[in-house]
Image (tube, rainbow, N blue to C red):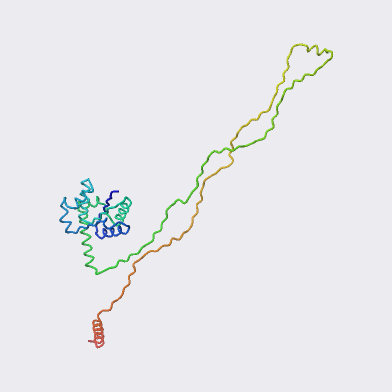
Amino acid sequence: MAQQTVIGMFDDANQARQAAQQLESIGVTRDHIDVSAQSAGTQQTTQSSSDDSIGGFFRSLFSSDDEVQNYSEVARRGALVTVHADTTQEAERARDILDRFGAVDVDERAQQYRSGWMDASQQQTGAQNLTDQQQTTGAIPIIEEQMQVGKRVVETGGARLRSRIIERPVEEHLRLREEHVNVERIPVNRPATEADIQNFREGEMEITERAEVPVVGKEARVVEEVRLGKDVEERDETIRGTVRRTDVEVERMEGDQAFQQRRMTSDDDDDTNRGSGL
């Protein structure tokens, strides 16, 4: 797998060195990390050159002239960290570390340089720092952390209702009734009566057979309802943590012993003169 090149631009060389140290701490070998910081003199002599080593380096990486120009201009004024990553994962971790330690947006910073805003801002900052150094001999900032507690909504679970149709066998016992016609011939030997003579003609007789058969019908009825709802309860929780604050101890240092002795003698003479009215 080909190496991947990750570039980080920094305004401050110290930031670049700290980022390089952090890269080494996560396992990036030192020979895969290049740190280049331009001095003020180097900036003045190389800023107008378009064919210097910096420009050639970025031409080997980018095909766009705008990108080459932007990266070259920012690199000439600040610090450059180049990481040659062996894998995509290593390249992504290197990029995150460079961003975390203050890598600048190259296009935005190049635009600021062209507009002159960045140079004016740097000059103003330098003048202010010089004034501060002249007005104070030394200061320790008192830094205090404050814990900010908020809340956010997270999903802790839930319930889902899903309906489906299932079939189950059922049985019902039913008693059915059927009719059957019986034909019975009974031998008779008697004289015909008047009624028999009247029925002595053609005719027919029929009897209908009937039977009960099962009739099945279905009726849908609602027998139960399943509902989803939720109850809301509130609870108090104590959030504990630690915050840091700068604590400064003031210690008086004794001066030269001979100076202290002369100071005590001078104080005694002043008291004597004041007592004598001189």
Q: Is the residue 185 above or below the residue 141 in the image?
A: above
- The image shows residue 66 at horizontal and vertical percentages of 21, 47
Please report the residue visible at 50 percent of the width from the left and 47 percent of the height from the top.
159
Residue shown at the point (72%, 18%) measured from the top left: 206
Total numbered circles: 0
Q: Is residue 250 above or below residue 25?
A: below
**In the rendering, at what x and y percent does residue 94 appear?**
30, 54
Tell me the residue at 28%/77% (across/down): 253
Residue farthest to the bottom, as pictured: 276
Tell me: 97 left or right of 168. left
| Quarter of the rendering occupied by the C terminus | bottom left
Work out which residue is located at the far front of the displayed protein and give it: 1
Please tell me in which quadrant of the rendered image residue 122 appears. bottom left
Which residue is more in the foreground, 199 or 7? Answer: 7
Residue at horizontal 46 percent and vertical 59 percent from the top: 237
Left-right relation of 278 to 222? left
Q: Toward the viewer: 86 or 232?
A: 86
Side of 214 relative to 131 (left or right) = right
- Across and down, in percent, residue 107 comes to 24, 50
Foreground residue among 21 and 11: 21
- Return the x and y of residue 270 as percentages of the image width and height: 24, 84
